């Protein structure tokens, strides 16, 4: 039963006037699986996730949660679903505890559930604090706590860590990781942080301008880009000779009129001595040199021609 | 040159004229109001209804004074008994009444009511002009309960309080929820939508009762304002009033997610009623064609019903019809609101 499909999106399309926000996308999420929708702002992530949440309606295609569509099943689906919206404000001058009690009442849950959630998200010390006095990270923890009140089978989080500092982000990640170990919740998370998708999710879908560009586990995606390494360098003058002919170089990208470059290589130990030799031979001065593994960001740039956070 | 003072000024202008809704509420709405009120008050003559105690033949003042007295005011003289006259004052139908006798004319009016004062002054001037009337003129202030301006004002203010409390309290809260995307978050749970609205209304009953009781106690202690009619009737029409205005408030909140538009909408609902419904001065001064419309406005209906209970001693029988109409209006407003309500 591990492979129970909880979310099924089939050829879903949504258009706003002339803008195609979500263009004919399909995917499935199994129980216990965490899926990331990774893409820049305006990629259509929120529209897609809000259609799964039942807040927006698709123009065409099907969305099934536990095999049920929203039509006629809204009440049932709300009960198995936990969501956190991109921006969540709560009602000013209500405490954390009061807010949790309000939302647990919607699910017919006792107030003791609020207490459990306070512990789960680590807001016990803030229980009496007015929600408008919470920090961004605490507010997101509260939003996540509300999403978890009903022990959802399906968890949909829209940019849960956007705008948070690294510490707060790490705390949210830990919460979600713990949840993954203790439940079989299926989660979809939208983000434009590559590390978040890498760290939390089993599967990543890269989305841009309403379409899916790539899909798979992190190793699969990296492999689709071509396993390998990256060399960044800056020299004082442009090279005369092409770098393409250096050993194991697969691709060359230039910035700044031929003085700042990026090499995609199969094996860095093959390429580097030759690159340095060429620099010496052409009497150039090496200003910067850095090498690293291929990341999702490289894949994203190669797919879209721009960086994720641009 | 890029002057920061000018930039800051332009900033204000831009946010003003680039929001069509603000333009409407800031410019269009006042013009419409001016138009409506202008039509309402464009009668060249001001109607002044005066009651004379006695029968028609006891003295025909219209004959004595001539048809064109007091222009631009137009006087209408009605003849009636002291009881009718007092009721007329309580309802704001007449401003004063007088009793002619062999050696004097005694005016009865509330000295704190400026309209009554004006009417008295114009009338006195007419009497004295060309010595048409040479009798002594005496003024007897009306200070008995139920005939004073405060007796007219307090029930109306309580009704207005309910309107403001509902429309500002409910509409403003709900529109804010929408702006903060809380409505969107709430409907993503199994929350019952009917509970959501019922809660708004239920809380509002307690709040408006508290507000009304405080205002009434103040008026009772300092101005000896009394409720002469049935308390049960008062409770009944009060509840129907809250239902009506809550429905209206939910309807007002049903679409917008913009604070300026919300502000404008709320004012558009409350201001005309505040002016037309005879809260501060009697609506009898409006043109006759407008009065039937004014009378079916929810605020007029509630204020009139309150007034009849406070000063005329009305019971359940008298307020049954307005209560029913208020109730139906409330249900209709709520029904429409639910049909068009925007949650996200």
Image (cartoon, coloured by chain):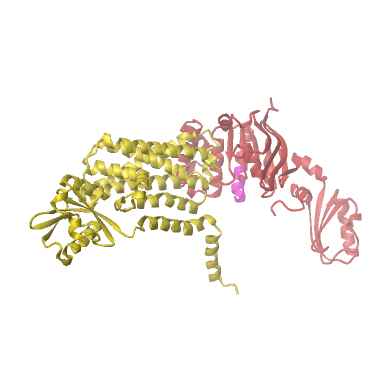
Residue at (59% x, 29% y) in the render: A73
Magenta region, main secondary structure? helix
Residue A201 as seen in the image, left or right of residue A144: right
Location of residue B109 by image quarter? bottom left
Work out which quarter of the rendered image holds the C terminus of chain B and state it. Answer: top right
Residue at (57% x, 47% y) in the render: A87
> Would you say residue A93 is visible in this rendering?
no
Chain in red in the render = A
Q: Position of residue A33 (x, y in %)?
A: 68, 34
Residue A262 as seen in the image, left or right of residue B74: right
Residue found at the far bottom of this picture: B1
Residue found at the far left of this picture: B103
Residue at (29% x, 41% y) in the render: B305
Q: Position of residue A302 (x, y in %)?
A: 79, 50
Location of residue A59 by image quarter? top right
Residue B38 vs residue B324, the one in the foreground: B38
Residue B166 as seen in the image, left or right of residue A34: left
Residue B271 vs residue A181, the one in the foreground: B271
Q: Is residue B255 magenta?
A: no
> Chain B's shade in the image?
yellow
> Would you say residue B82 is visible in this rendering?
yes
Q: Is residue A169 magenta?
A: yes
Say above or below: B339 vs B275.
Answer: above
Residue interval drawn in magenta: A161-173
Residue B217 vs residue B39, the one in the foreground: B39
Count of residue discs? 0
Q: Position of residue A162 (x, y in %)?
A: 62, 49
Q: Position of residue A161 (x, y in %)?
A: 61, 46
């Amino acid at each position: 039963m591990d492979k129970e499909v909880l979310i099924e999106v089939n050829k879903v399309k949504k258009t706003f006037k002339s803008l195609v926000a979500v263009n004919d996308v399909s995917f499935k999420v199994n129980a216990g699986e965490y899926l990331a929708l990774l893409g820049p702002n305006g990629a259509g992530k929120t529209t897609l996730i809000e259609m799964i949440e039942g807040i927006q309606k698709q123009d065409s295609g099907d969305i099934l949660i536990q095999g049920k569509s929203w039509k006629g099943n809204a009440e049932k689906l709300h009960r198995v679903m936990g969501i956190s919206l991109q921006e969540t404000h709560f009602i000013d001058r209500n405490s954390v505890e009061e807010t949790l009690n309000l939302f647990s009442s919607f699910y017919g849950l006792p107030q003791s559930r609020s207490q459990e959630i306070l512990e789960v998200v680590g807001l016990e010390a803030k229980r009496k604090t007015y929600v408008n006095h919470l920090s961004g990270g605490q507010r997101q923890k509260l939003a996540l706590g509300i999403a978890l009140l009903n022990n959802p089978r399906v968890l949909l989080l829209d940019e849960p860590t956007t705008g948070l500092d690294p510490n707060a982000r790490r705390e949210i990640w830990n919460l979600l990781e713990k949840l993954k170990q203790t439940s079989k919740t299926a989660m979809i998370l939208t983000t434009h942080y590559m590390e978040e998708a890498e760290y939390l999710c089993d599967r990543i879908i890269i989305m841009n301008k309403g379409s899916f560009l790539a899909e798979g586990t992190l190793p699969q995606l990296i492999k689709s880009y071509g396993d390998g390494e990256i060399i960044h360098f800056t020299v004082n003058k442009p090279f005369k000779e092409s770098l393409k002919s250096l050993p194991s170089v697969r691709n060359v990208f230039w910035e700044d009129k031929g003085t700042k470059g990026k090499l995609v290589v199969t094996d860095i130990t093959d390429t580097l001595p030759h690159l340095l030799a060429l620099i010496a031979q052409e009497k150039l001065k090496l200003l910067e040199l850095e090498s690293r593994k291929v990341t999702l960001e490289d894949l994203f740039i190669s797919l879209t021609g721009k960086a994720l956070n641009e | 040159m890029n002057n920061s003072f000018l930039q800051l000024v332009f900033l204000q202008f831009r946010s003003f004229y680039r929001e069509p809704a603000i333009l409407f509420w800031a410019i269009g709405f006042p013009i419409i109001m001016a138009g409506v009120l202008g039509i309402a008050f464009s009668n060249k003559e001001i109607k002044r209804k005066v009651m004379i105690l006695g029968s028609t033949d006891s003295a025909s003042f219209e004959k004595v004074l001539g048809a064109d007295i007091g222009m631009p005011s137009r006087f209408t003289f009605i003849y009636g008994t002291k009881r009718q006259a007092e009721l007329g004052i309580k309802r704001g139908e007449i401003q004063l009444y007088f009793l002619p006798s062999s050696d004097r004319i005694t005016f009865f009016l509330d000295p704190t009511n400026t309209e009554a004062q004006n009417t008295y002054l114009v009338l006195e001037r007419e009497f004295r002009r060309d010595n048409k009337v040479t009798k002594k003129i005496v003024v007897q202030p009306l200070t008995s309960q139920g005939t004073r301006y405060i007796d007219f004002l307090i029930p109306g203010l309580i009704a207005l309080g309910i309107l403001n409390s509902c429309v500002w309290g409910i509409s403003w809260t709900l529109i804010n929820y929408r702006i903060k995307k809380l409505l969107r978050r709430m409907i993503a749970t199994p929350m019952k939508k009917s509970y959501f609205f019922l809660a708004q209304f239920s809380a509002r009953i307690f709040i408006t009762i508290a507000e009304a009781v405080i205002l009434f106690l103040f008026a009772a202690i300092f101005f000896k304002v009394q409720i002469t009619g049935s308390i049960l009737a008062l409770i009944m029409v009060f509840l129907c009033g809250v239902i009506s205005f809550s429905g209206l408030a939910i309807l007002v909140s049903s679409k917008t997610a913009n604070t300026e538009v919300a502000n404008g909408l709320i004012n558009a609902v409350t201001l005309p009623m505040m002016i037309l419904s005879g809260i501060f001065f009697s609506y009898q001064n409006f043109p006759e064609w407008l009065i039937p419309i004014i009378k079916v406005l929810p605020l007029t209906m509630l204020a009139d019903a309150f007034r009849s209970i406070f000063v005329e001693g009305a019971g359940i029988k008298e307020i049954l019809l307005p209560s029913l109409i208020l109730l139906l209006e409330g249900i209709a407003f709520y029904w429409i609101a639910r049909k068009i309500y925007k949650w996200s």
